[in-house]
Image: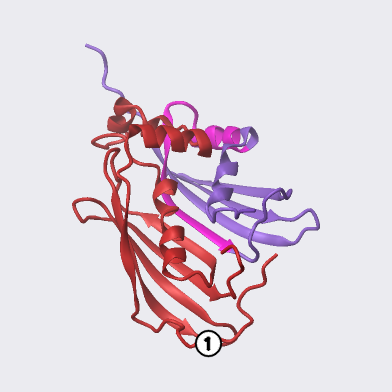
Chain colours: A purple, B red
Amino acid sequence: MGFVPLTFPFRWLAHPAIRGLILQLIGGQGFLPVHEAQSFAYEHELQIETDYVLAVEARRTAKPPRLTLKMAVSTSRREICAHLETVLRIVPLYLEPVS
Amino acid sequence: MIEAGMEPAPPDWPKTGDEIRAQNFGPFDRDALARYAAVSGDDNPLHFDPDAARAAGLAGPPVHGMLLLSCFEPLIMRWRRDLFIARLSGKFLRPVLAGEGIRVSGRVMRRRDVPRPELTLRLIARAQNNDLAILGEAAVWYKIPGPLS
């Protein structure tokens, strides 16, 4: 027995499909996402050894450069368990030129 | 599933202004960040590569924000086991650099007894130099603790 840590759904951002979406929306390898804010809102606790459906909505803003991800976690019967919101500031990599 | 919050508040239900005793977490050294990256999948080079951190305007690689935010759950659950954390949010105000720890604390900002016993908590994480690193908030509901909680 055990429990699912409250922040565990953040782990699902590393899913290749979501990771690829984030990389594409921040502008590729020349940029880094910096975590600015995070929220979790639960209707029900998540259970171990249970399948869930994750829906992701991404919104990119230019000024300031940010990527906001809104995620909904639901059961296979479409019962909402949790909502997450992740706010990422997008930082360009200013690497010093080699002299 | 645990349905929380439909029972009446217990006699020792916290009051507005009650404090959650501060706890220290960390320090989070490079090995700790590598382990967190492995289990979380967050392998952003910002957290490992000093050049990437400098390019982002930081003095050094920062600790993952989610690793720091996750410290609020044990803070709350060590305070009281009869809670369901319905909401948790945090703003990352200052980076905590690799090798540093944090001190987390909380306070009851609001108590409601109907329609369910509910508390709104102000949560704070401070870096080693006492700078405010995370400003957070949580909503917790009363639940009867289970045998394993």
Name the residue: 50% across, 58% down.
A39
Left or right, A13 with respect to B95, comes to right
Q: Position of residue B10 (x, y in %)?
A: 52, 85
Determine if the magenta segment contains residue B101: no
Q: Residue at 29% of width from left, 28% of height from top?
A: B50
Q: Specify start and end residues of the magenta stretch as a single range.
A: A18-41
Q: Tell me if A48 is positioned left or right of B22 in this view.
A: right
Q: Residues within 10 Å of mark 1 (few under 14, many from 20)?
A: some
Residue at the location (47% across, 77% down)? Answer: B119
Q: Quadrant of the C terminus of chain A?
A: top left
* Rendered image quadrant of residue B103: bottom left
Say whether residue B65 is left or right of residue B103.
right
Residue nearer the viewer, A75 or B20: B20
- Residue B20 vs B13, above or below: the answer is above
Can residue B105 be seen?
yes
Query: Which residue is most to the top?
Result: A99
Q: Under tag 1, what secondary structure? A: loop
Q: Is residue B144 shown left or right of residue B67? A: right
Residue found farthest to the right: A77
Residue A29 part of the magenta-drawn span: yes
Residue identified by numbered label 1: B113
Q: Nearer the viewer, residue B44 or B140?
A: B140
Residue A63 appearing in the image: no
Q: Position of residue A55 (x, y in %)?
A: 68, 49
Which amino acid is tagged 1? Answer: Asp
The chain letter for the residue carrying disc 1 is B
Q: Position of residue B107 (x, y in %)?
A: 35, 73
Is B55 above or below relative to A39?
above
Q: Position of residue A38 (x, y in %)?
A: 47, 54
